[in-house]
């Protein structure tokens, strides 16, 4: 399986291009390099975006469904596809599955797709395309089940993505992402900030229309799905779990010391 380039590899390659750009321009003027070499960053970006093919396909599927949702679905159709707890108990599979690809608005879609792009690429690189899909849809099923047990419904891919978040921070906790605020942040930090937000949302309920129980169900899903991975992958995730527990302990200690908690 070809390794998927990381965000750090992509960023450093672009920095190197900028540094060497004056020399490239001179070579182009002297006829030693084709002018098309100036398009190298665009080519690199295209490869970076589509290289994790299944992650890219899931993003396209969600965007495509959102376009259908806006332009082609009537209000009655949309209402029938919004997941409700009774759909699970009555085994109505259409709204259960359809709800995983629906989004409330463009901001909801953009946030979910950003996290899918970040964490999906990590999981696809480490575990492969098939296991990415297995974790994605397995987490969606478990997420919807737990949400229904707590009387919650809703729409969105976030339950499935939560499963990818939990998997990624365990399998590659120190992977650096630049896509949140433009600076390198370990995905372990980003993942735990998301988990903390959902724990807070459950303990201190607010009218934010966010399915916190669904998200927590997605995070929890990996505790079940991990048993379907091979021994080497499970061992890697055990090591990742130790780093995560150490990070949480240190973060909690610092928060207590500075009076945050």
Image: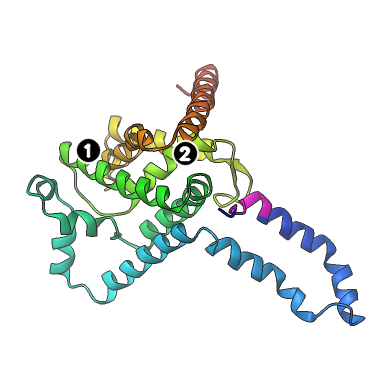
Where 94 falls versus 135 (above or below)? below
Q: Residue at x 34, y 37 (%)?
A: 225
- Is residue 206 rendered to the left or right of residue 83? right
Question: What is the x, y in percent for residue 151?
Answer: 15, 40
Question: What is the x, y in percent for residue 103?
Answer: 30, 59
- Judged from the image, the secondary structure of the residue bearing numbered disc 1 is helix
Q: Residue at x 38, y 43 (%)?
A: 162
- Is residue 76 rendered to the left or right of residue 39? left
Question: What is the x, y in percent for residue 248?
Answer: 49, 25
- Judged from the image, the secondary structure of the residue bearing numbered disc 2 is helix
Furthest residue to the left? 90
- Is residue 20 rendered to the left or right of residue 148? right
Where 95 falls versus 146 (above or below)? below
Q: Nearer the viewer, residue 89 or 203?
A: 89
Q: Nearer the viewer, residue 111 or 243?
A: 243
| Residue placed under numbered mark 1 in the picture | 146
Residue 258, labelled with which disc? none
Q: Which residues are magenta?
A: 3-9
Where 207 falls versus 224 (above or below)? below
| Residue placed under numbered mark 2 in the picture | 191
- Is residue 161 rendered to the left or right of residue 209? right
């Amino acid at each position: 399986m070809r390794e998927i380039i990381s965000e750090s590899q992509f960023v450093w390659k672009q920095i190197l291009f900028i540094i060497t750009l004056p020399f490239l321009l001179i070579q182009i003027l002297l006829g030693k390099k084709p002018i098309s070499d100036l398009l190298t960053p665009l080519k690199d970006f295209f490869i970076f975006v589509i290289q994790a093919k299944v992650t890219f396909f899931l993003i396209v599927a969600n965007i495509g469904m959102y376009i259908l949702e806006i332009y082609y679905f009537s209000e009655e159709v949309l209402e029938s596809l919004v997941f409700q707890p009774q759909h699970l108990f009555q085994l109505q599979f259409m709204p259960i599955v359809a709800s995983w690809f629906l989004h409330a608005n463009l901001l909801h879609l953009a946030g979910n797709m950003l996290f899918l792009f970040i964490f999906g690429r990590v999981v696809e690189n480490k575990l492969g395309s098939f296991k990415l899909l297995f974790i994605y849809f397995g987490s969606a099923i478990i997420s919807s089940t737990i949400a229904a047990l707590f009387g919650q419904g809703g729409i969105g891919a976030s339950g499935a993505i939560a499963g990818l978040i939990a998997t990624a921070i365990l399998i590659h906790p120190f992977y650096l992402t630049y896509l949140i605020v433009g600076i390198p942040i370990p995905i372990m930090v980003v993942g735990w900030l998301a988990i903390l937000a959902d724990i807070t949302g459950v303990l201190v309920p607010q009218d934010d229309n966010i399915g916190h129980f669904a998200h927590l169900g997605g995070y929890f899903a990996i505790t079940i799905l991990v048993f379907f991975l091979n021994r080497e992958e499970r061992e890697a995730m055990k090591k990742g779990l130790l780093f995560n527990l150490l990070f949480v302990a240190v973060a909690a200690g610092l928060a207590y010391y500075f009076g945050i908690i």
